[in-house]
Image: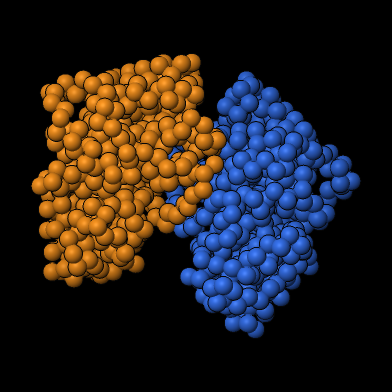
Chain colours: A orange, B blue
Amino acid sequence: MNDFVFYNPVKIVFGGGKVNQAGEEAKNLGSRCLIVTGKGSAKRSGLLDRCANHLKEKNISCTILSGVQPNPRIEKVYEGIKTAKDNRVDFILAIGGGSVIDTAKAIAAGFYYEGDAWDFYTMKSKVEKALPIMVVLTVAATGSEMNSISVIQNDLTKLKIRAQGYPLFPKVSILDPELTKSLPKDYTAYASVDIISHVIEGYFTSEDNNTPIQDGFTEAIIKTVIRDTFKLMKDLNDIEARANIMWASSLALNGITTSGIGKFKFENHLIEHSLSAFHDVPHGAGLSIVIPAWMKENKNNLKHKFEKFAKNVFNKETADDGIEMLEKFFKEINAPTSLSYYNITNFDELIDNIMECAPSRGLVLTRDYIERILDKCR
Amino acid sequence: MNDFVFYNPVKIVFGGGKVNQAGEEAKNLGSRCLIVTGKGSAKRSGLLDRCANHLKEKNISCTILSGVQPNPRIEKVYEGIKTAKDNRVDFILAIGGGSVIDTAKAIAAGFYYEGDAWDFYTMKSKVEKALPIMVVLTVAATGSEMNSISVIQNDLTKLKIRAQGYPLFPKVSILDPELTKSLPKDYTAYASVDIISHVIEGYFTSEDNNTPIQDGFTEAIIKTVIRDTFKLMKDLNDIEARANIMWASSLALNGITTSGIGKFKFENHLIEHSLSAFHDVPHGAGLSIVIPAWMKENKNNLKHKFEKFAKNVFNKETADDGIEMLEKFFKEINAPTSLSYYNITNFDELIDNIMECAPSRGLVLTRDYIERILDKCR
C-alpha cells in the first residue's frame, strides 16, 4: 500500500424525506443564505420553494442564483460571487447535481478571494478559505457532495479543469433518494457511467498495488451500480435502486476507494473534459465513449488488473471479456460508446486541448497516445 | 437501505515512518500535551521518547500518563483527568492501541465535566465537549483511532461498557504500519479477530437489508484480514500485510460498512465484554470464542445472509460451511474457540452481567438465549 492522507469531514444525512431537515441542518451555518440551483427543474418540482421555506422557518433569509448549466461555466461563478457579496451571505446551499455543487464551491472560495476565481483552477492560487457549503443532492453522479473538488469550464479558453481544497468540502449533504426519481432515463444512465468511471480511474492505477480492500470496495460499487441501473432502466421509481446508487455516487469519489493506491491518473476524465468543453457532451455520455477505448489501449500494461476486474466484477476470465462486458452494459443502458453518436470526427483541436490540460493533472502524455485512444472511440 | 447519518472527521495520516510527523500534526492542537500510553512497550521500544521529542521540537510540553492496561479501567481515567487538569493541558496524545485510545477519550471528555466521568458510560450524561485527541496507533484492532467510541471497564460494578459522542473523534490519527511489527503473534491473531468481529456484527443485522455495497465492503475487509493474518503468522514483519490490516482496522468500525444497514445489535461484543470484565480475557480472544457460537445460534434466522457470507467470503455453499471456515481460521491462527481454554465453566454471574449490560446497548435479550450461546462456547 502507498502512503496517504484521508480526511473527509462531510456530514451525510441520508434517507427518504430527509430534505425536510434542510432548515435544521442549515441553522448552524448562518442566517443569510445564497441558494444556487440549475436551469429550472428544482423550481418546477417545487423543491426550491420547499428548501427555501425550511430555511425561512429557521429565520434564514435566502437569495437565489439559478441557471447553472451542465458543464458549469465560470461566468455563472462570477455572477454568484457578486450576488453573494451584495447580499453579504453567510453560507451557500446548493440544490442540484455536480454542476450546481461545483459552482457553489467556486462561489464559496471566490467570496473571500481578491483575485479572479479562475485562478483556483489554473493553479495560480490555492483555496485557503471558503463560505460554508450545504448540499441538497438531486443527481447522484459526480460525488461532489462528498469531496473537495470543483470542476468548472471556461468557454474563452476552452478549458474544463478542476480546483481542490479542504475548504471546499460541504459541511453537510442531504442525500434524499426520493429527489433523484425525477431524473430522466438517459441522464440516469449517464450518471451511473460517471459513478463507475470514478472508481475505475483508481482501480487501474497499477498492475498490483496490493490494495485488496480498496479493490474489493471498488468491485462492490461497480457491481451494485450495474445491477441497480438495470433495475432503474425498467423502473425509474425503484427507490431501493435509487438509494444504492446515490450512496455509491458519494463513496466512489470521497477518497475511500483511492486511499493507498498511489497517484492515479484520471486520464478518462482528462479526455472527456475536453470532449465536454468542445462539444458540450453530457459528462457521463462522454465517459461511456472514452472508457472502453482507454481500457483497450491500456489492457496490456495492466494485464493482471484487467483480468482481476473481469473475474471479480463479471465472473469472466480474460481482460477482453471484462472490457466487452462493461461496454455491453453501457450499450444496454443506451449510453453512447462511439464519437460518431455526436458526429465528432475532427480530433486535432481536441488533442491540442487535452495536451494543454494534462499538466494541471500532473500528467505527461504523448499526442500519439491520446490519438490512439480517440481512434478507438470512433 | 435504511436512513443514516454518516460523519467522520478524523484525519488519517498513513504510511511507514509517518510517526515522524507527530510534531507537525500536534502543533495545531495546542502547546501542552498529556501523552497517554500503556504499560511499558512504547517506553521500551523508544517510541514514547521519539514522539515526545517530535512534540518538543514544536515547543509542545509533555506530561506522561503511563500504565493503561488492556480492558482499560475507570481508575486510570480518573488519574488522567487529574493529571490533565493539574497540568492544564490543551490536548491528549494517545500512543498505543484501543485501550490507550479509549482511556484518552474518557480523559478528554472528563476534563470538561463536573461530575463523574463514568456517567458517560452509564448514559447518565452525554459527551458535549472534549479535549482534542491525537493518536499514534501501535495495535490495529479496535478501530478506536477512527471512531467516536470509548469502552471502559469498572471493576467495582463489573461493567465493561461504552460511551460515544462526536467530541470523541480523534482530530488526527497517525497510522504507521512499522509500529505494529512488534506486536506478538498471539495478540496479532486476536487483533485480526477483533477487526473481523466489527464488520460481522453489522453484516448479520438482517436477512436482506439490500445493502450490497456495505456487504461487499465487509466481505473485502474479512477476506483481506484472513489472507494477511495468515501471512503474518508466517512472518510478523510482513509490512504489506501489517499495512492492509491496519487500514482494515480503521475501516471496520468507522461507520462506512454500517451506514444504511439499520440498527445493529453488537451482541458478540456484549457477551465478550462480560467475559473480559469477569475473567480479564483479551478482547479478541474472547470474540473468537463467542462468534462461532453466536453464528450457530443465529444461522437459521438469517439463513440467506449466512449463505451469502459462505459464498462470498469462502466460496462455499451452506451457512454451516461458512461458520466452519471462520472457526477453522480462528483455530489455525491459534485464537481460542472454547471457554475451556480459560477454564470458564460457571455461567451464572456472567449471564447476570450480560443481562445487566444489554439495556445500555438497547438490547432486549432472554437469559435462555444467552445461555444457549454460552453453551455453544464450551
Which residue shows up at 37% across the image and 25% down it?
Answer: A298
User: Where is the C terminus of chain A found, in terms of image quarters?
Assistant: top left
A283 left or right of B328? left
B333 left or right of A281? right
Residue B128 x/y as whole percent: 51, 70
Which residue shows up at 42% across the image and 54% down it?
Answer: A8
User: Where is the N terminus of chain A found, in terms of image quarters?
Assistant: top right
In the depicted structure, whether residue A331 falls above or below residue A241: above
Which picture quadrant has residue B84?
Answer: bottom right
B332 left or right of A79? right
In the depicted view, which residue is nearer to us: A65 or A109?
A109
In the depicted structure, whether residue A299 falls above or below residue A280: above
Which residue shows up at 14% across the image and 33% down it?
Answer: A349
Residue at the outermost left position: A156
In the depicted view, which residue is nearer to us: A210 or B371?
A210
Residue A100 x/y as whole percent: 22, 49
Which picture quadrant has residue B146?
Answer: bottom right
Which picture quadrant has residue A16?
Answer: top left
Q: Is residue A363 visible?
A: yes
Q: Is residue A333 visible?
A: no
Which residue shows up at 61% across the image and 47% down it?
Answer: B246
In the depicted structure, whether residue A339 falls above or below residue B185: above
Residue A184 x/y as whole percent: 21, 33
In the depicted structure, whether residue A150 falls above or below residue A238: below
Q: How many marks?
A: 0
